[in-house]
Image (cartoon, coloured by chain):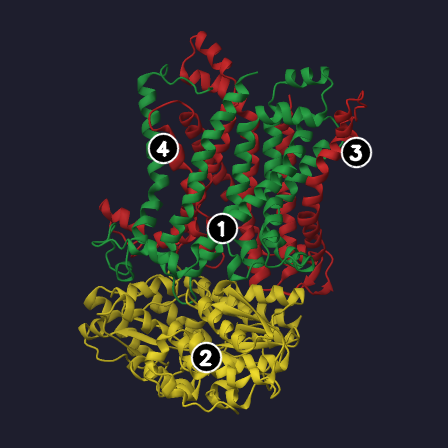
Chain colours: A yellow, B green, C red
């Protein structure tokens, strides 16, 4: 391929400060314009933060400058609306050519027949070769095929406040549930701060249960795609959480979602919570003096290996997309410089091998520890009824926390789920 | 003016009424204290525990920063186009309808009124999918027109009902005098009913305007071109995927209240003027 | 077509041939009918049809269910609970809103120093979009950083109330927020109604030596009835269908304990992708509100049209 600049040198810190347009222009000029592309491309991105829209606009502008024959329309959709907007666009039959979607929704788009696999006609070997293999192979793999490219990668871990833990006599987080529970109460007794907080309120509620489910050897689905979260492992995991919530050391999980727990952690009101790698960036801005670390989420016992949960978003490609234009555009937005700027803006993990050694990702121990886990991440299982599972599991967890018999609540959710997929 | 003279009230009752009025106002305004307080905090102030009402060093910069971070001017312009367009369309359609329902005797009037209110009974959430497809087939996605149409329509039952109530309260003599002169119905509407009912019309259209100004769901569904966003969905930019920038969200929201607030102050004058005109019978 | 027969006649000054009220009504109602027919009636009919089918999130009709979606609702305890809760919610919010607004409208209709300011300030919550309002109150109910507990602490109450964890606290709070959001527009509507009441009535009352309270009960209230009736009807419809407040505060949780029919419907349609069942819920809402509207207008509309 024509691109053989020394990318890592070009992408020095100084260059990073320049706009994406300036950086990316020479790349695509050598790449695509030679082919004299003409046509249209529509691109719908999810707005992660206030920086997202301007970033993609600059990417689109620089692509257009290099490919005057291509008319690119950019749509920016707020993250909270992204799923429903995508559904409506598919229903109306006008899904944009490229869509930034949560990976867990991908089976829905596949089942609706709206998106295609990433054949060689549409993604260059260079891009495929640069993406971290584990992400490319596992991130968007459904029914034996790969349905898109990772576009945003994050990892989850247990954040802990070093000072609060040490006041209770801990230098690290216990690795098993029993030890963990003791630590949670001890921190509360010693400091008055909450020991641990988890979210049973928001859309992420299933993940907090899920961590304990996985770390007890359970899973959400069985091999046939039926509900398995009401297994023995699931019941024990939920029982553990309910018992934790009953102690005064844990704030009411049904009343505090993750966005409520985060400021508590930043202010030193909460000693431990499970969150994404981006939270480390937020802590550094909002509470620069807070000492914290990230550990694995405890498991039920020494025989279970703790899970490193990776969460990705995927760039999916509509069946109607023009292959040549799409290929050129993907080359453009998957350059090392362009990716690095996006990752830094949004607090994402680097997904290209060519980014691994950049100072943006090696400078900080917490980010580095997440980067080191990239290859061993466990991802959300892809299931066409994932959204329904999330909702049913959340309700079951809430029921268990508000006094309903725990096993009955999980069984009910499982029955409902299985009835749903039987249709 | 129809303002009731307060002087004739017994002083104790007057005192009680005023105390209660200001108490209610304090409760109503309390959340704005929090809004202003939050808008003046830095990110670090926001996670200070225990919280304070006013940060030691108020960050007035937040009010400047939001203009830079999001294209607030464009958002305001889009909101004015959408809410203004919806209000005008609404007025053109609802005034004749309200007049007919209040003043004409015809079979099916009750039924029509029921149908009108019935359309209001669908939560917009339900209508979303069907209206989206319709906008797509009309080629109206990512246009202001799509939101103008829908906003004018969702406020229509409301304005028709209010207007017909106001038109109905116009004294019968006015209509009878006009009928004697053999005045046409349109002239009667424009020359007599609209001037007299001005306070009611302005009130009803203020509702249409404010509802359109505050509308979120349709705007976020039909408009994904960032350049066309109104304030409601534009301000939402500060609610990110992983964190909400409360200080900016509140600063931008407070700024976005200002045009409506000024508009209301202007309308209030118009309300009084319309009233004076109506009093001259 | 018919409109043309009226206006050119007037211009030409010919002896006019008056249309009957019925014919004129068709002309005057045509634009409204066209607009509402296109953007409301069609989607509503679409919803009615969907309620008879199993429909997925993309709006694809999967199977005919007849009244199956409705029968499922009858047997669903969560639905009946949400239905009753919605009725309680609506009554609480509308009754308190109406009483408070009536009081404010009457007081703000009097001349006094600072009236302009009071009126303008009252409108502030209304000028703030419900989405931001929901988020603002959500932030205000944070147990550690929120203004509610902060205010309590200022008055010496240091209990750490978890406002949204428990329906016993969260539901009354949300009723309060809905009242807070409904009072300004209702007051405005009633104020406009008060202003159209003829001053002569007050003069006459004053001549009779009437005192304030008496004027209110015997003159103001009866004359305000038409506007009051409309405001109650519209508030019932709005509050019954209200979505953003509950959704941003609790999403109807925990475990559906603060669900109203609209949040219940939203979960069915947009989280569980059972769009047919969601359509059935909206038809139920439709029938309930329509029944209310008909009874309400039977009782009050007669007095509106003198």
Give the numbered dot on residue B77.
1
Q: Secondary structure at mark 2?
A: helix
Of circles 1 and 3, the one toward us is 1
Q: A105 or B187: which is nearer to us?
A: B187
Give how far apart the Cα atoms at labels 1 and 2 are.
32 Å
Q: Are marks 4 and 3 on the same chain?
A: yes
- Please, which chain is the residue tagged with disc 1 on? B
Marks 4 and 3, how far apart at CA: 48 Å
Give the numbered dot on residue A24: 2
Residue at (44% x, 28% y) in the render: C105
Can you say whether C175 is above or below A98 in the image?
A: above
Classify 10 Å Cα crowding around label 3: few (below 14), some (14-19), many (20 and above): few
Q: Chain of mark 3?
A: C
Mark earlier in primary sequence (4, 3): 3
- The location of residue B242, given as percent across then percent down, is 40, 67
Distance from the alpha carbon under mark 1 to that under mark 3:
38 Å
Q: CA distance from mark 2 to mark 3?
A: 63 Å
State the image coordinates of residue B210 (x, y, percent, origin top left).
Answer: 50, 42
User: Could you give the CA–CA distance between mark 1 and mark 4, rounded to whole angstroms?
Assistant: 27 Å
Measured as percent of width and height from the top left, residue C242 is found at: 52, 47
Q: Label for residue B253?
A: none
Residue at which label 4 appears: C117
Pointer 2 and pointer 3 on the same chain:
no
Image quarter (top left, top right, bottom left or bottom right) of the C terminus of chain C: top right
Give the SS element for disc 3: helix
Please state the chain letter of the residue tagged with numbered disc 4 in the rendered image.
C
Whether the residues at callouts 1 and 3 have beta carbons within 8 Å, the answer is: no
Which residue lies under the disc numbered 3?
C2
Q: Are marks 1 and 2 in contact (CB under 8 Å)?
A: no
| Whether residue A218 can be seen here | no
């Amino acid at each position: 391929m024509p691109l053989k600049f020394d990318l890592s040198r070009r992408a020095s810190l100084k260059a990073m400060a320049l706009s994406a347009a300036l950086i990316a222009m020479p790349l695509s000029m050598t790449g695509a314009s030679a082919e004299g592309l003409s046509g249209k491309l529509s691109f719908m991105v999810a707005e992660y933060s206030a920086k997202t829209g301007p970033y993609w606009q600059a990417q689109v502008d620089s692509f257009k400058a290099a490919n005057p024959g291509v008319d690119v329309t950019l749509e920016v959709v707020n993250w909270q609306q992204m799923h429903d907007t995508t559904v409506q666009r598919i229903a109306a039959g006008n899904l944009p050519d490229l869509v930034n979607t949560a990976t867990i929704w991908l089976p829905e788009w596949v089942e609706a027949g709206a998106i295609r696999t990433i054949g060689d006609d549409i993604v260059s070997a260079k891009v495929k070769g640069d993406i971290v293999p584990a992400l490319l192979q596992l991130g968007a793999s459904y029914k034996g095929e790969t349905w898109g490219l990772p576009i945003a990668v994050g990892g989850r871990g247990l954040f802990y406040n070093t000072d609060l833990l040490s006041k209770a006599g801990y230098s690290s987080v216990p690795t098993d549930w029993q030890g963990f529970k003791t630590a949670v109460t001890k921190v509360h007794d010693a400091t008055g701060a909450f020991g641990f907080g988890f979210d049973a309120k928001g859309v992420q509620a299933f993940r907090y249960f899920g961590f304990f489910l996985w770390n007890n050897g359970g899973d959400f689905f069985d091999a046939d795609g039926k509900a398995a979260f009401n297994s023995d492992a699931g019941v024990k995991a939920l029982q553990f959480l309910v018992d934790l919530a009953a102690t005064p050391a844990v704030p009411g999980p049904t009343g505090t979602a993750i966005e409520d727990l985060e400021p508590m952690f930043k202010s030193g009101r909460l000693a431990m919570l499970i969150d994404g790698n981006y939270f480390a960036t937020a802590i550094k801005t909002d509470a620069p003096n807070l000492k914290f670390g990230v550990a694995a989420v405890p498991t039920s016992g020494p025989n279970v290996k703790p899970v490193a949960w990776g969460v990705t978003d995927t760039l999916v490609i509509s069946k109607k997309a023009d292959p040549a234009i799409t290929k050129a555009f993907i080359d453009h937005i998957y350059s090392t410089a362009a990716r690095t700027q996006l990752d830094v803006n949004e607090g994402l993990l680097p997904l290209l091998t060519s980014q691994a050694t950049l100072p943006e990702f090696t400078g900080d121990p917490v980010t580095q520890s997440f980067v080191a886990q990239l290859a061993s991440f466990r991802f959300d299982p892809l299931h066409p009824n994932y959204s329904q599972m999330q909702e049913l599991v959340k309700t079951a967890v809430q029921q268990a926390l508000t006094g309903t018999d725990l096993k009955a609540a999980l069984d009910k959710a499982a029955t409902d789920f299985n009835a749903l997929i039987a249709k | 003016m129809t303002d009731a003279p307060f002087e004739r009230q017994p002083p104790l009752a007057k005192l009680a009424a005023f105390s209660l009025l200001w108490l209610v106002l304090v409760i109503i305004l309390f959340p704005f204290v929090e809004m202003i307080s939050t808008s003046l905090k830095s990110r670090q102030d926001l996670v200070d525990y225990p919280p304070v009402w006013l940060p030691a060093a108020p960050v007035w910069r937040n009010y400047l920063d939001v203009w830079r971070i999001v294209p607030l001017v464009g958002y305001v312009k889009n909101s004015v186009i959408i809410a203004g367009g919806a209000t005008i369309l609404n007025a053109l359609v609802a005034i004749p309808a309200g007049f007919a329902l209040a003043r004409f005797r015809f079979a099916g009037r009750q039924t029509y009124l029921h149908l009108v209110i019935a359309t209001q009974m669908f939560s917009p959430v339900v209508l979303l999918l069907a209206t989206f497809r319709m906008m797509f087939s009309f080629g109206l996605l990512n246009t202001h027109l799509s939101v103008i149409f829908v906003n004018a329509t969702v406020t229509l039952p409301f304005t028709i009902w209010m207007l017909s109530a106001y038109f109905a309260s116009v004294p019968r003599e006015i209509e009878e005098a006009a009928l004697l002169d053999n005045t046409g119905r349109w002239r009667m509407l424009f020359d007599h009913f609209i001037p007299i009912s001005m306070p009611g019309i302005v009130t009803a259209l203020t509702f249409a305007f404010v509802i359109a100004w505050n509308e979120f769901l349709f705007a976020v569904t039909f408009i994904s071109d960032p350049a066309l966003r109104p304030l409601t969905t534009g301000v939402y930019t500060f609610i990110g995927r992983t964190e909400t920038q409360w200080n900016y969200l509140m600063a931008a929201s407070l700024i976005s209240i200002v045009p409506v607030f000024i508009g209301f102050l202007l309308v209030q004058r118009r309300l009084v003027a319309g009233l004076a005109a109506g009093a001259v019978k | 077509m018919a409109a043309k027969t009226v206006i050119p006649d007037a211009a030409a000054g010919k002896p006019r041939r008056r249309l009957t009220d019925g014919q004129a009504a068709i002309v005057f109602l045509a634009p409204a009918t066209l607009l509402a027919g296109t953007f409301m009636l069609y989607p509503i009919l679409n919803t009615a049809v969907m309620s008879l089918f199993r429909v997925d999130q993309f709006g694809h009709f999967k199977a005919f269910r007849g009244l199956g979606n409705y029968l499922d609702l009858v047997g669903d305890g969560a639905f009946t609970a949400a239905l009753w809760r919605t009725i309680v919610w609506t009554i609480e919010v509308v009754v308190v809103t109406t009483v408070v607004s009536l009081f404010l409208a009457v007081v703000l209709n009097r001349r006094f120093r600072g009236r302009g300011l009071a009126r303008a300030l009252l409108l502030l919550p209304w000028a703030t979009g419900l989405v931001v309002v929901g988020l603002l109150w959500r932030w205000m109910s944070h147990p550690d950083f929120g203004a509610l507990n902060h205010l309590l602490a200022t008055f010496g109450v240091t209990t750490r109330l978890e406002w949204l964890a428990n329906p016993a606290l969260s539901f009354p709070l949300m009723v309060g927020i809905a009242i807070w959001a409904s009072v300004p527009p209702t007051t405005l509507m009633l104020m406009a109604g008060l202003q159209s009441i003829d001053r002569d009535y007050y003069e006459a009352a004053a001549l009779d030596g009437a005192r304030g309270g008496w004027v209110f009960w015997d003159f103001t209230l009866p004359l305000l009835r038409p506007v009051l009736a409309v405001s109650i009807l519209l508030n019932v419809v709005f509050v019954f269908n209200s979505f953003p407040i509950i959704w941003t505060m609790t999403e109807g949780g925990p475990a559906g304990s603060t669900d109203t029919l609209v949040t219940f419907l939203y979960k069915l349609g947009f989280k569980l992708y059972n769009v047919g069942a969601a359509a059935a819920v909206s038809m139920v809402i439709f029938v309930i509100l329509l029944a209310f509207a008909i009874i309400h207008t039977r009782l009050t509309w007669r007095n509106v049209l003198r």
